[in-house]
Amino acid sequence: MSKKSLLFIVIVVSISFSVFGSPRRDTAKGDIHLTGPIRGGEQGWPYGAYYGNIRNIGYVEEEYFIEGNAVLYNLTGEWTTDGKWTLERGRTFPYKTRLLVHRPADSAEFNGTVIVEWANVTSGYEMAFVDIAGMPDLVDRGFAYVLASVQPISVNGFQNPQAPSREVRAVGTSMTVQAAPADLTRGGLRTWDPQRYGSLSIPNDGISYDIFTQIGIAVGPNRKTLTSGVDPMGGLTVRNLIGIGGSQSGIRILSYTNGVQPLENVYSALIPAMGSGQGVDFLEAIAADRTAPDPNPEARRIRPAMIRDDLTIPVMVFNSESEADWTFEARQPETDRFRHWEVAATSHAGPRKMQLENLKTDRDGITYSLHHIASTRQAELDWQPVLSAAFWHIHNWVNGEGPPPSFPPIAITQTNGRIEIQRDQYGNAIGGVRLPALEVPFANYSVVLRTRILPSSFTIPFSTSYLRQLYPTHDDYVAQVTEAVNRALETGVLLRIGADEYIRRARAAPVPEASYPDALRQFLR
């Protein structure tokens, strides 16, 4: 081989490692094995499947099983708030779990980036913060998506036969919600469909981090050399992986970012969402296990943490207004590898996300869903169109086109230890990523009074007389919304489908007549 040819090979290998991330040092072909697509079972479909016919959007949905041996990480040294932790690999445990894949049916439509989401298990059953059905801009831009079941609760659900009481506080009221005991054991995959999922096993919570790594390997650019069995990506050429988790899973993604990513270097970018500003430990015990005497055991295991500033991959913290106060002290400067987006006037679990989730749980027979709070506690603004834009920016970021735009954080003051969000003349938060509905408001969007389930959030429409002061005619209102939407497109807050939806809704709204539009139904096509 000539020196010129050898130099070319070295350059190609170097570029591959810098773009894709180097493979795990301790992974050999066959250590990670995949089977599928999985069919049959008592229910006849995967848990949490796409709501509707996914073929109508040009995508394929398939479920696969993944099995291997996952490592338990041990923290060496101190848990510091700067996130610069050092982990070492400890014992390994056998596991078998599932991944749910949504990918373009036509390989030519695939943009090369796979979004891998850490499934949220806070309620004892899996929920996804990213949902292709509710985020059509992701389909339009050709992303593939994988929901990763990585924690024991995904497989087993809650095991405590006694349902805990949950206190819910709203404006001027309080009530107690008691979940039905049988429902708490219904949400695990093995219970939901024992015929389909009976072979799955995740023995402890600590290995969830390595399972998330191995699922990334199984759908990533190096999968053909590092896994055995079937290809869950159907032969697609994958170039980048974006890992994300929301709420409890977002806290775990922050810990993954600071501790595991520097060791394993599998993901091209990471998004700790809806809870960043704190991390959770790497212990074996199940943090959200309802058998524990503490009704909120994870609280004592969560600790404040920032994103470490020596990472070599892009990281974006993505929060709603709901998290602005309790992540305030973990704010940190942006860099060429770090962005922090807070979407003003949005709630922890937005209305479109919750409506789609409830449609799924109704279909799947999960009676202990969030129906009992979602209908009266949701501000109507959605962060999902902004998250779609964020994914597109990060896709471009990891492909060398520079970081996403920067936006000021939500304005907060701290007086005598009390944190308060600053508000404009309409009662809406100042600062943050701003949707057109904040720039051209017809309501006050209040995110108030933290609770033990979700932060309270309300839409309080303006009166007709006030609306007529702001927008003398309906055409005036539509014109101002159109201008705000165009600005959102220019600044990168929205992509085209999300922008078109705003203009469509503005044209259909009765403004300047006061009304409470049925925004949830309008979002469903």
Image (spheres, rainbow, N blue to C red):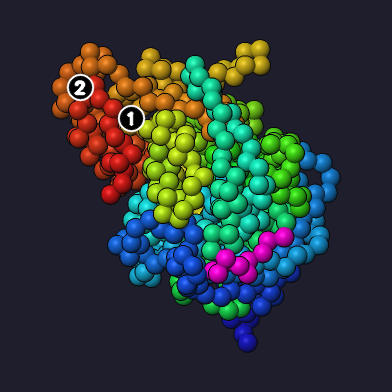
Residue 4 appears in the picture as rendered = no
- What residue sits 45% from the left and 18% below the top? 423
Q: Quadrant of residue 485?
A: top left
Q: Quadrant of residue 296?
A: top right
User: Which residue is tagged 2?
Assistant: 513
384 left or right of 205? left
| Quarter of the rendering occupied by the N terminus | bottom right
Q: Residue 128: where, in percent of width, then height?
A: 50, 50
Mark 1 and mark 2 in contact? Answer it, CB < 8 Å: no
Whole-number angstrom distance, CA of label 1 to CA of label 2: 16 Å
Depth check, front residue: 13 or 139: 139
Q: Residues within 10 Å of mark 2 (few under 14, many from 20)?
A: some
- What residue sits 34% from the left and 58% below the top? 52
- What residue sits 37% from the left and 32% below the top? 380
Depth check, front residue: 395 or 383: 383
Give the extent of the magenta segment. Answer: 194-203
| Kind of residue at badge 1 | Ala
Location of residue 72 with respect to 502 vertically, above or below = below
Q: Quadrant of residue 10?
A: bottom right
User: Which residue is tagged 1?
Assistant: 437
Prevailing secondary structure of the magenta residues: loop
Location of residue 460 with respect to 330 vertically, above or below = above
Q: Earlier in the sequence, mark 1 or mark 2?
A: 1
Q: Residue 123: where, in percent of width, then height?
A: 57, 45
Q: Nearer the viewer, mark 1 or mark 2?
A: 2
